[in-house]
Amino acid sequence: MSPSVATAPAADALPQLVADRIPLLLVPALALAALPLMSSLSTWVTLTVAGLAMGMIIFIIASGLTLVFGLMDVLNFGHGVFIALGAYLAVSVLGAMSGWTGSEHLALNLLAVLPAMLVAMAVAGGVGFAFERVIIRPVYGQHLKQIMITMGGMIVGEELIKVIWGPQTIPLPLPAAFRGSLLLGDAAVEKYRLIAVVIGLAVFAAMFWVLSRTKVGLLIRAGVQDREMVESLGYRIRKLFVGVFVAGSALAGLGGVMWGLYQQNVTPQMGAQVNVLIFIVIIIGGLGSVGGCFIGALLVGLLANYTGFLAPKVALFSNILLMVLILLWRPQGIFPVAKR
Amino acid sequence: MLSRIFSGDLPRSRMLALVLIAIVGALALAPFVFPGAKALNVAAKICVFIVLVASFDLLLGYTGIVSFAHTMFFGIGAYGVAIALTRLAPSWAAIAAGVAGALALSFGLSLLIGLFSLRVKAIFYAMITLAVASAFQTFASQLSEITGGEDGLSFRVPEVLSHGFVLGGHSILGVPVDGKLISYYLLFALAVALFLLMLRIVNSPFGRVLQAIRENDFRAEALGYRTVVYRTFSNVLSAGFATLAGALLALWLRYNGPDTSLSFEIMIDILLMVVIGGMGTMYGAVIGATLFIVAQNYLQDLMKLASDAALGIPLLSSLLHPDRWLLWLGILFILSVYRFPAGIVGRLRTRSKSHSAAQ
């Protein structure tokens, strides 16, 4: 490869990464734009926290998907299965520990929710490993087959969930101490939403740290930019990819637990429903970009809550509307990944 | 003559030809051979889905585009007829108006989606259509004054097709010539005509260009074909046929709601039918749709027997539960994509080819 070809995209991409701050302003801009439309400040605070919480959960689910796509050009239409799986595992684990979830002590509640999350992540990660092996590996580089195969994986996964847990909707009540809301001034903020925001921020921080401060993260970012170059430097991008896929599935499992608690019930179809949402998010963010995915998720979450309050009929299409607007502005998404 | 009707694209396998003759024969004689309302419903549904799956094959199998918005167009057709017949008198003119309106909407929408997203990768298109289709589904159930919301619309069809109509007390082989029989044969004839028309399209020079784009879009572009134009045109055509299939379904059921024509489950069903039958073969649509719908309606009975037999074994009996039939078809679907991408039709064709090579 001649030097001019190798350096040209890098020269384009590097200054852009530093200078491109406009998207970072989108989230505060949206929040501020909604402020004058609200009847009171407290409503705005409630809705903003709700929107951020929803956005954080979506981000947790979608981040793995966008990285997997960026790294290996694999789009997993069956990602939704891991969400549903995580939520159902939470039902089982929390159901088994009903003594702890029923108590008013926050510590005991956390002791019940934490294992539920860990079990969900571990099992979803394990299933993700098998999924990659059986479903995705044979169809690398063939988009058409990939879409169909992963869709098939989703059908089978959903049916297997029905075999294990039954086809009916199962309630997933929040642990006692997570219920109710706090008063911030006049604004009532549900406790669980605050917890979701905190967990979401923690996941984002951890992911940001891994991606920007560790060697693995460096390799992942480099792989997203130019896979062949990383391979020619002697790193096995395949192994890296399997790792990212497992991590992404585990995060989807975690997101599933949180989404299930957020909705307070789980259905086998929930994966397919959330799938639509996360596709919109990763398209908005730019396929392969974690930062774009974060901003996209927050925008979708905020807009869904604002429009849900102001104009419920519009709310159903707010996502599509947002996607169209963003794509008119930047056809490749908020943060276009260089090689695409 | 035969070759002209089939646009020079004959089954090319004796086994396949026999299966096709059996299916078409069974469908043609369904009211006489299979008595009962359920059997006739299944036969009519197979006719509708053959058209629908063939139109999806035009897009997926021949052009290599995965769309998840195909049921949207199917639903538009069904709602077009349903709304027109609810609002206007039950007449042929109302049906024509409904179909025309639905076709116009489908053409407009498919053109818009195509121009907006077909320039980029297949994956992008699949995602966009998934989002648009789910938004459309909510849209349709929200506009309840027009679409009847979740309840859907029941309506009356023209006199000749209605169940009460009897043609002068005639009966053929003991089957009375009533509105139901006339409806069925109208449906059957239209399905055959639409299928042959699509077979004509894919075997025209235009169809060859679509296949060239599927095989290597870069090369097709280099040969001077505007791939975006061809892709968009294929998208619009396939949306049009799906709309007509939807109109047929609404006419047969005399009812339409979100679950009968718009739901995502139907999208999955179509995908399974086209892949199991055989992508890019058109005849695959016939076999896939027949196999799937027969399975949908009768496999459950069979599985109930198996499930009862395995009652003692805990996991196996729930795996064989009649409601889990989609699990097995899903596995069959995954295996088809891996092991025989050209589906049942492709399998039969290669078999007959190796037979003739051996002789």
Image (cartoon, rainbow, N blue to C red):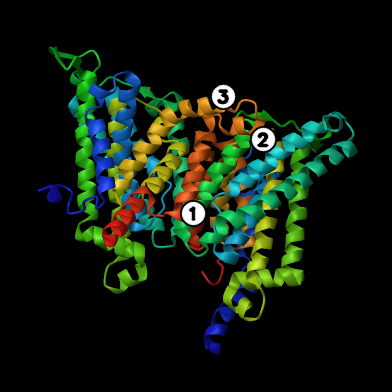
Q: Residue lying farthest left?
A: B1
B95 relative to A108 in the view: left or right: left
Task: Classify 10 Å Cα crowding around label 1: few (below 14), some (14-19), many (20 and above).
Answer: many
In three-dimensional space, the C-alpha distance between marks 1 and 3, rounded to whole angstroms, equals: 36 Å
Q: Residue lying farthest top?
A: B169
Give the residue type that dot 2 points to: Gln
| Disc 1 secondary structure class | helix
In three-dimensional space, the C-alpha distance between marks 2 and 1, rounded to whole angstroms, equals: 28 Å
Identify the residue at horizontal 28%, vertical 30% (top origin).
B81
Residue indicated by mark 1 = A147
Camera-nearest residue between A137 and A19: A137
Identify the residue at horizontal 77%, vertical 45% (top origin).
A119
Residue B149 lies, in percent from the top left, at 44, 27
**In the figure, A1 relative to A331: above or below?**
below
Identify the residue at horizontal 14%, vertical 51% (top origin).
B3
Q: Residue lying farthest front?
A: B359
Residue indicated by mark 3 = B308
Chain that bears disc 1 = A
In three-dimensional space, the C-alpha distance between marks 3 and 2, rounded to whole angstroms, equals: 36 Å
Residue A252 - label:
none
Question: Which mark lies nearer to you, 1 or 3?
Answer: 3
Q: Are marks 1 and 3 on the same chain?
A: no
